[in-house]
Amino acid sequence: MKRIITLGMAILLAACASSNVEPPAPLVNFTPKIKVERVWSRSIGSADAILRLGIVPASNGTNVYVASHDGAVYAFNLKNGDHVWRTNTKLSLTAGPGVGEGVLVVCASNGTVEALSTKDGKQLWKTDVNGYVLASPAVSQSVVVVTTTDGHTLALSSLTGQVLWNVAHEVPNLSLRGASPPLISGNTVFQGLDNGQLLALNLSDGSQRWSTSISIPSGSNELARLVDLDGVLAVDSDVVYAVNYHGRLEELVRDSGQVMWRREMSSYTGVSEDSSHVYVTDTHSAVWALDKATGIPVWTQPAMRARDLTLPVPYMDTVVAGDLQGYLHFLSKQDGSIVARVRQGSSPILAPPIVVNGYLVVLTAGASLAAYKIEPLAG
């Protein structure tokens, strides 16, 4: 039987011999270099800070969409936060929304995948995928892709919800709670698995283009052999980036899976990228910037150790990550120095911020949604 544990449980089990769980690093002093303005904020329904659910903010460039665990789905105007619509799905939501081509998709704990219109929130279709979904679905023009914790990646018609294909994967006996969100790029679906594999599947029929193991399980016990690839994947032109727990960060050729470079790294949040660098938060909450061409580290920022940072997200001249105490940390892209810090609230920020048309949008586990903008300080 497959067993699922949270990252916190894994840390506690690993530390039980010494009863030593590292506390979050204290906030360090710094000289602010930018001004962070909260443009608007809204409170939505309940959210779950414990289960590390796959509920994340999403946007189509005009509105921001967000769901709550109690089944409510909201649309807010990106620029001013005005309420656009609200729908009650009457489901216990665990993942989403995924947004694309006028369709918004959310997933529930009972295996229901439901699609709503981005325009008014009206239901378009509902499908049962017979599995628990903990990763935000990917939505393309004609296909919705979801992944279940029991090892299935499914493609659904974005028009009708009909299952187009269903690919099963081997799952380990023990894994971290969570899953890598599927990523659609062109006619390829990239999927990270709990056994440390990265798959490239044909979007049209689910056939496998290639697969590779980012790292192979090793160690004297099941905890040491955890190699979940649960984080966000990144694609840039002809390459794809992936990082796993107890494993490696790799750059691979998009069409073949050939490894261009690799570096030892352990992360459960994933990878982000810009024109020059890839960014990773490791399992100690140190933020890394690495050269895209070589994988050589450009800088690292360890000051937020054990603060449970999210995926670091490039935003203008900064990289931004949220932490378990509700702080947003803004780091310089140039050297990783801290240039600003704001607190959205006391609840953890579990979902990575998203960047849309110059706005930084952040959702906390306490159901606070906010949009920010930054500008340099005078002088």
Image: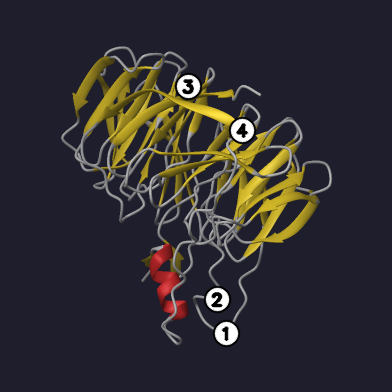
**Distance between the alpha carbons at the discs numbered 3 and 4:** 44 Å
The quadrant of the rendering that contains the N terminus is: bottom left
| 10 Å crowding of disc 1: few (<14), some (14-19), many (20+) | few
Label 3 sits on residue = 142
Q: Tag on residue 224? A: 2
- In the picture of the structure, the residue carrying the numbered disc 4 is 33
The reply, left or right, for residue 203 in relation to residue 290 is: left
Q: Residue furthest front?
A: 379
User: Which of the two discs, 3 and 2, sits closer to the camera?
Assistant: 2
Callouts 1 and 3 close, C-beta under 8 Å: no
The answer, for residue 122, to whether it is visible in the render is no
Q: Is the residue 270 above or below the residue 83 in the image?
A: below
Real-space Cα separation, disc 1 to disc 2, in angstroms: 7 Å
47 up-or-down from 303: above or below:
above
Q: Secondary structure at mark 4?
A: loop
Q: Are marks 1 and 2 in contact (CB under 8 Å)?
A: yes
Residue name at image x 40 percent, y 24 percent:
158
Coordinates of residue 229 in the picture (x, y in percent): 55, 55
Amino acid identity at mark 1:
Ser
Between 325 and 367, the one lying in front of the other is 325
Q: Position of residue 309 (x, y in %)?
A: 50, 51
How far from the left and from the top, in percent, is residue 71?
21, 36
Q: Marks 3 and 4: which is nearer the front?
A: 4
Residue type at the position of mark 2: Ala
Quarter of the image with the C terminus in it: top right
Q: In the rendered structure, are the residues bearing label 4 and label 1 in contact, judged by CB atoms less than 8 Å apart?
A: no
The image shows residue 115, relative to residue 107, as above or below, that is: above
Q: Identify which amino acid the numbered label 3 is placed on.
A: Ser
How much space separates mark 3 and mark 2, taking CA atoms?
Answer: 40 Å
